[in-house]
Image: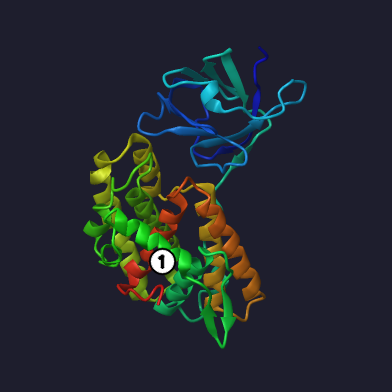
């Protein structure tokens, strides 16, 4: 049998820079989770293109040049839990059930860094953003969750909300109600941890989404009205502390993602969505700038769709958390109305 060879397209900016070793924690069709001795409470995830990258991730593709394989295999046919891993600056050597070891080359790969979401200080002296700006953003995201780009009609943002309401019905079946999400207290969000099925339960993904929205707001405090900025900072600190206490309630993999979210480290699609939201907020703060609202809404739509593609349901859960994270700050439920 002819072995497979893989090459990394990009390496997450939190991945180890020195040699280490570990074992395979879990294997899926297009992803492998590694437990390395230098990161005992985290996982490094290898994904096959076109799956996106992570701060602790390596996005790879099959290296078919000079080899006979041209189609990426199901990784579950090549690796199994407990297999040994050797990580160096040049490659990752992973024990295979079929070929002894398979190499993932790290040479010639780029480092993936999260995009900048800081609003430009050149517009900080304009009118500060208020609850209405956050309402605009949350409704736009909810509309994008359907297959329509939001649009303006008679100075009002319009579009279908069908997919958002379907998402809320799905969560209600898990015991996660709209009232729970709009309760506006840290305990309500922390009680979501572990609710749902799968490697990353829905409640965990919602909490990650809330943390993402708080990260965006606290990064740009000077652009928001003082009460909103203070609320965001206070709630971020309280939620980080409370979620850290609740980590034992969920799966090992979800714990790893939650710890990263607590530290404001998010996957590539979520980071790009935050960047798209930042651009829209800049427009709302100063719409005299050389922006096209249609282009910004189209950009937001594309970013939302990439988040929705995460897992079987994780993407929608993260979006739900982001939507409610903004209303969490304003202490209103007007984010969709």
Query: Residue 246, image x and y in percent?
Result: 24, 45
230 or 277: nearer the viewer? 277
Query: From this viewpoint, is residue 117 visible?
Result: no
Indicate how the structure is coloured in the image.
rainbow
Residue 31 position (above or below residue 79) = below
- Residue at 61% x, 64% y is 299
Where does the C terminus fall, quadrant-wise? bottom left
Residue found farthest to the bottom: 154
Residue 155 position (above or below residue 168) = below
100 or 68: nearer the viewer? 68
Query: Residue 252, image x and y in percent?
Result: 34, 35
- The total number of labels drawn is 1
158 relative to 295 in the view: left or right: left
- Residue at 77% x, 21% y is 66
- Residue at 40% x, 42% y is 257
Quadrant of the rendered image containing residue 23: top left
Secondary structure category for the residue under label 1: helix
93 relative to 24 in the view: left or right: right
Query: From this viewpoint, is residue 206 visible?
Result: yes
Residue found farthest to the right: 66
Residue 177 position (above or below residue 223) = above
- Residue at 53% x, 74% y is 159
Where does the N terminus fall, quadrant-wise? top right
Query: Residue 145, image x and y in percent?
Result: 50, 63
Quadrant of the rendered image containing residue 173: bottom left
Quadrant of the rendered image containing residue 148: bottom right
Query: Residue 87, image x and y in percent?
Result: 52, 22
- Disc 1 crowd, CA 10 A, few/some/many (<14, 14-19, 20+): some
Which residue in the structure is indicated by mark 1?
Answer: 165
């Amino acid at each position: 049998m002819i072995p497979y060879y893989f090459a990394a397209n990009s390496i997450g900016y939190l991945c180890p820079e020195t040699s280490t070793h570990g074992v395979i924690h879990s294997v899926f069709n297009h992803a492998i989770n590694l437990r390395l001795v230098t990161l005992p409470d985290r996982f490094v995830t290898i994904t096959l293109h076109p799956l996106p990258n992570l701060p602790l991730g390596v996005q790879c593709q099959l290296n078919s040049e000079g080899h006979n394989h041209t189609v990426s295999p199901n990784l579950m046919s090549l690796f199994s839990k407990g297999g040994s891993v050797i990580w160096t600056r040049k490659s990752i050597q992973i024990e295979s059930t079929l070929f002894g070891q398979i190499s993932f080359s790290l040479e010639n790969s780029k480092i993936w860094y999260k995009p900048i979401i800081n609003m430009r200080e050149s517009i900080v002296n304009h009118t500060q953003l208020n609850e209405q700006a956050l309402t605009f953003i949350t409704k736009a995201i909810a509309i994008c969750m359907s297959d329509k780009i939001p649009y303006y009609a008679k100075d009002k943002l319009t579009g279908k909300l069908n997919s958002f309401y379907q998402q809320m019905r799905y969560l209600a079946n898990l015991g996660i109600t709209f009232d729970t999400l709009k309760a506006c207290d840290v305990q309500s969000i922390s009680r979501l941890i572990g609710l749902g099925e799968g490697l990353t339960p829905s409640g965990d993904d919602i909490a990650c989404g809330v943390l993402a929205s708080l990260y965006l707001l606290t990064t740009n405090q000077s652009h928001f009205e003082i009460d909103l900025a203070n609320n965001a900072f206070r709630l971020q600190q309280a939620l980080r502390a409370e979620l850290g206490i609740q980590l034992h309630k969920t799966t090992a993999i979800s714990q790893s993602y939650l710890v990263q979210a607590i530290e404001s480290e998010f996957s590539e699609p979520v980071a790009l969505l935050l960047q798209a939201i930042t651009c829209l907020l800049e427009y709302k703060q100063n719409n005299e700038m050389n922006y096209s609202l249609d282009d910004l809404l189209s950009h937001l739509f594309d970013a939302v769709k990439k988040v929705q593609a995460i897992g079987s349901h994780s993407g929608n859960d993260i979006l739900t958390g982001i939507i409610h994270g903004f209303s969490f700050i304003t202490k209103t439920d007007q984010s969709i109305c």
